[in-house]
Amino acid sequence: QKEVEQDPGPLSVPEGAIVSLNCTYSNSAFQYFMWYRQYSRKGPELLMYTYSSGNKEDGRFTAQVDKSSKYISLFIRDSQPSDSATYLCAMDSARQLTFGSGTQLTVLP
Amino acid sequence: ETGVTQSPTHLIKTRGQQVTLRCSSQSGHNTVSWYQQALGQGPQFIFQYYREEENGRGNFPPRFSGLQFPNYSSELNVNALELDDSALYLCASSLEGLTEAFFGQGTRLTVV
């Protein structure tokens, strides 16, 4: 079993839809939770960074962490074609990041 | 403020050869980590350097080695290349003690 599980998709939604991306994890030592966006042939770009259970909002993006269920989510409101990318969840323990396999998202105009 | 830069962007090597990849960290960042990303997968942690010393290592064999220089830039060396080493190699910089890591655009290595 992988430490971090992420549905690979692909996920295709119409412009303006609310997108929900999810990851589950098994390692209780993970303390920090991140979401990265990766465009094709580019490096990952940090979107959101959270520590505690609960919600954190930044513009159209909301990150949610439930440590009791070992479950994290990223919500994208009013999705745009420019949001089309691969979204990676990542978790930190002992200075190294453990990534999910990524969810490929396409937002159709 | 400059971001993380990596060179070269693309590289083709033959099995058994050696390769060196380079990374310049973001201004003010003293910690550099290297990741390997196979096609369709998330990045996997190779190792981290802080104050010119290895500060953590993932599940990679010793033929993967690295250096960090006094200006915090870093190199990743891979000896005896294998076909499975073909991947996108990512460098990330951060400040020691902080989790937020910022990635470069990566070096795409193809081993033939």
Image: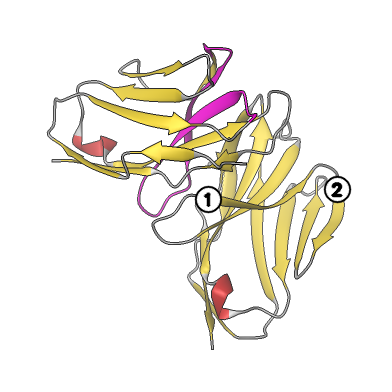
- The amino acid on which the numbered mark 1 sits, given as a three-letter code, is Pro
Seen from the viewer's position, the closer of residues A8 and A88 is: A88
Along the line of sight, the residue nearer the viewer: B104 or B84: B104
Residue stretch rendered in magenta on the structure:
B28-53
Q: Secondary structure at mark 2?
A: loop
Q: Which mark is residue B51?
A: none
Residue A33 image position (x, y, % from top left): 71, 44
Task: Point out the tag, 2 or 1, that comes first from the N-terminus.
Answer: 1
State the count of labels: 2
Q: Which residue position holds label 1? A: A44
- Mark toward the viewer: 2 or 1: 1
Residue A22's quadrant in the figure? bottom right
Does the stretch in magenta take in A11? Answer: no
Which mark, residue A53? 2
Residue A39, percent from left and from top? 48, 61
Viewport quadrant of the C terminus of chain A: bottom right
Q: Residues within 10 Å of mark 1 (few under 14, many from 20)?
A: many
Whether residue B112 appears in this view of the structure is yes
Residues at discs 2 and 1 both on one chain: yes
Q: How is the image coloured?
A: secondary structure
Residue located at (20% from left, 31% from top) = B82
Q: Chain of mark 2?
A: A
Tell me the subunit letter for badge 1: A
Residue at 58 percent across and 35 percent down: it is B26
> Depth check: B78 or A100 in front?
B78
Identify which residue is drawn at 54% across, 27% down: B32
Q: Which quadrant of the structure image shows residue B16? A: top left
Which residue does the image show at 40% across and 18% down from the upper left? B66
